[in-house]
Image (tube, coloured by chain):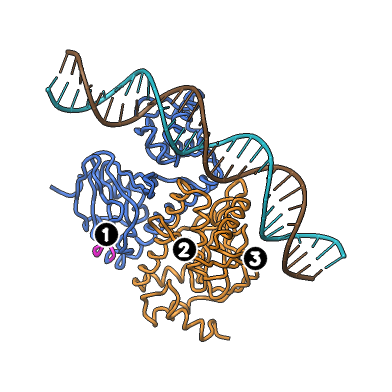
Chain colours: A orange, B blue, C cyan, D brown
Amino acid sequence: MPLLSCEEQSFFLNGAPFFRGLSKDVILAFLDLGRSKVFKKGEFITRIGDYAEDVVFLITGLIRVCACSSSGRQFTFLLLNAGDPYNLMGPYLKRQRFLEARAIIHSRCLCIHEADFTRFVETHPPIITNIMQWIGVGIDSAHSRLLDMMDKKASERIMRALGSLHAKFGSPLLFTNQDISGIACTTTETTIRTMSFLRELGIIETRRGKIWIKDPVALKDVEFGDLTF
Amino acid sequence: MPLLSCEEQSFFLNGAPFFRGLSKDVILAFLDLGRSKVFKKGEFITRIGDYAEDVVFLITGLIRVCACSSSGRQFTFLLLNAGDPYNLMGPYLKRQRFLEARAIIHSRCLCIHEADFTRFVETHPPIITNIMQWIGVGIDSAHSRLLDMMDKKASERIMRALGSLHAKFGSPLLFTNQDISGIACTTTETTIRTMSFLRELGIIETRRGKIWIKDPVALKDVEFGDLTF
DNA sequence: CGTGTTATTGATGGTGATCAAACGTCGTGG
DNA sequence: CCACGACGTTTGATCACCATCAATAACACG
């Protein structure tokens, strides 16, 4: 069985944001480095404290990447879509990182060993731009969220989270209030109160684990700099 | 006049954290790309909204990098020491970034044009590791601060900030309470109250713009993951 | 049909932002 | 050399936001 189905390969060549701008040959050669690996729902790709070395690309499924404080609170700072990379810097860091990646649904990944990855980067410099851009978005997102934590109210953070999720995953969103609170850095109760408010305004509709965004414009970003998942 | 004095060059070759692990020849060839540029106290290296392209290395001085929210609140997320790089990703991003870098004291920098930088990286792959490690520290620091914002009290954040600053700059620290509040993401008043508390405990001594750390151990990190400036 | 998960609402309290006012210190220019 | 203004420091009072605790209801799945 080939590593990727026809549609999957074509998606990596044309649709996947990470690979944008790279030539077909380079992408194919790159994908050829990977081995397929399946993670069942709830399974960990990496745990907190792991020395994560492999670079991972999600083929199908959904993966949540989150950090966890000593008090047990955890917050989601990345949700991987099909085609998205994870742990791009792992091969270079060689140290423990305090993040965990977990499959939300049954997911299939393409895993590239660190040595293969670094060798490929050295011999195909154009991919450096793609890597840097991806990491840059992640850094800007982290800083943007720090600013939000400083001087945005919880309800505003939740609205921003909903807006960004809608941009990435469409509607309906398959997330619980608990999921949303992990993204917006607040509690479940506060999230529910805000959601109930947004429902009254007709901006969203909700049903156990599903959120329909009826009025995306009302959730529009006001802050300079995007939140990205 | 040569770009770097003898001591400066020797510092870049042996002391500067960023260049650790690179061969002497590579470092010299790299430094050779740069032009010297002086920034007076208070002058901006980049402003919010700039398309920053050049990569900057601080030779002597002190530079604050901070982000600014729409409400005008700003927080410091990086303080550059001699030898530290700034805007490593700029050459690859080609878009507005919402950060500003400003000279706290009279500072001299080595500026490398984006095209020279990317060309050098492509022809000297070992430097990719240094770049990635530097960026990795920055990302981990940002995430660590997000966790702090979530479930650490303001006083704990201030203590952590003081501990990290002490590790990087020694004692006394030449920062005002306002500076500290920008780093710990809180207000001047809250910072002053905490400082006054720490003074009573004998952990610090302060005088207008100066902070002596008498008991660094008391400020020790408890959280998993370092804060870095 | 029972159990675990998610949603919901109310009451309470603490943290820390905000406003206000005053004082010490430093540098500058008349 | 002094007066002034800018800046940093300090303290007190107030109050909004939101985390926390608690208890119940609705729903899904075996």
- Looking at this view, is B32 or B10 the one in front? B32
Q: CA distance from mark 2 to mark 3?
A: 42 Å
- The numbered dot on residue A207 is 3
- Can residue B220 be seen from the camera position used here? no
Residue at 43 percent of width and 46 percent of height: B228
Residue B115 highlighted magenta (yes or no) = yes
- Disc 3 residue type (three-letter): Arg
Secondary structure of the residue carrying tag 2 is helix
| Residue farthest to the front, as pictured | A201
Q: Tag 1, which chain?
A: B
Q: Magenta-highlighted stretch: main secondary structure? A: helix
Q: CA distance from mark 2 to mark 1?
A: 26 Å
Query: Whole-percent x and y of residue B26?
Result: 28, 59
- CB of mark 2 within 8 Å of CB of mark 1? no
Looking at the rendering, in which quadrant would you find the C terminus of chain B? top left
Task: Give the side of residue A198 with respect to residue B42, left or right.
Answer: right
Q: Which residues are magenta?
A: B114-118
Query: Whole-percent x and y of residue B33?
Result: 22, 58
- The numbered dot on residue B53 is 1
Q: Residues within 10 Å of mark 1 (few under 14, many from 20)?
A: many
Q: Is residue B135 above or below residue B157?
A: below
- Disc 2 residue type (three-letter): Pro
Residue assigned mark 2? A91
- Looking at this view, is B134 or A130 the one in front? A130
